[in-house]
Image: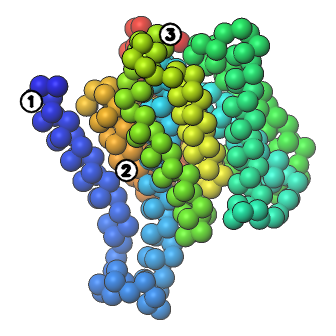
Amino acid sequence: MTDRAKSKVLVTMVGFTLLCILTTPWLGQQLTSWDVLFSPKADKVDAIIFWQIRVPRVVLALLAGAGLSLGGVVFQALFRNPLATPFTLGVASGASLGVTIAMVTGIHFTLVGLSATSLASLLGAILSIALVYGVARASGKTSPSTMLLGGVAISFFFSSLILLLQYLSDAGSSFRILHWLMGDLSRASMDSVLQLAPFVISGIVIVSIFHKELNLLSITDDIAASRGVDVHRTQKLLFFAVSLMVAGIITVCGPIGFVGIMAPHICRILIGANHRFLIPASILFGASFLTLCDTLARNITSTAEVPVGIVTAILGGPFFLWLLFSKKNSPV
């Protein structure tokens, strides 16, 4: 890497770090005194709003945005497809189906610190992973293109089951499912932050360890194998780790789309495709991007909050089309 390229990467990383810092809770928050910041147990109204509503929501947005962006980076490298995300590969649909079943049946219990909804989401994601690999093995080929097509088919199938359950449920359950499927951060609390943090942090750690392998896998499996990479083991580990991370995000926030497409590609344009730098850049930018989108969603109208998933979809649709037509060599 030349000195000019290193300087560009450094400037970009510093810029993303500053952007992430600027989306922290104290911006836009009218504080009557500094006690609100330094006294979490203060009984003032501003302190309660700040520490119990504002801070958890922003932290949740930062975690979810970082995880969704990281998921896009990994899936695009594994499948060598610029449009690959957990949403196009059936993982998000599987997790969503699990949560929908839990909502419709009304099951409530806690196991090893996880609620029934969380466990249902994880089981749905695992089922999706198993089906994707099962379809690929049944076809006699476990190539990225075969898994990608199988994931898309499973995603459509699970989405149809979600619509069926929503149609057959009562009005109250149907509305809850519809609102949850839009992707929303309004239910943020410190409990939800603590529930999501282990999924995202563990995903970041695992993916960061394998940044060199991702560089090789993004070229071809043969080149990665020739450099000593256990291709199938690495693919399964990363696929499983990222899928569980995304399932944890969907459990808390609902399916928030397009973050995993927009953030990685913007970072890739700015700093290149080296995952040593792309991974942290995507984490920072994705976290900032979703937080800013949530801020926009809360202020679009004065009468009600717009779910953040709607905002990301409005921004992501045109971006998706631009990406589709700008990639002349795209396999899609």
The crowd level at tag 3 (other Cα within 10 Å; few <14, some 14-19, many 20+) is: few
8 left or right of 180?
left
Q: Which residue is mark 2?
A: 288
Name the residue: 70% across, 54% down.
118
What's the image's color scheme?
A: rainbow
| Quadrant of the image containing the N terminus | top left
Name the residue: 51% across, 72% down.
53
Residue type beneath disc 3: Pro
Residue lying at the far front of the rendered structure: 228
Residue 164 position within the rendered picture, expressed as x and y whole percent measured from the top left: 85, 37
Q: CA distance from mark 3 to mark 2?
A: 30 Å
Earlier-in-chain disc, 3 versus 2: 2
Q: Which mark is residue 106?
A: none
- Judged by depth in the image, the label closer to the viewer, 3 or 1, is 1
The crowd level at tag 2 (other Cα within 10 Å; few <14, some 14-19, many 20+) is: many
Q: Which mark is residue 331?
A: 3
Earlier-in-chain disc, 3 versus 1: 1
Q: CA distance from mark 2 to mark 1?
A: 28 Å
Question: Is disc 3 placed on a helix, strand or loop?
Answer: loop
Question: Is disc 2 placed on a helix, strand or loop?
Answer: helix
Residue 38 position within the rendered picture, expressed as x and y whole percent measured from the top left: 34, 83
Q: Measured along the vertical axis of the image, is residue 312 above or below residue 231?
A: below
279 left or right of 41?
left
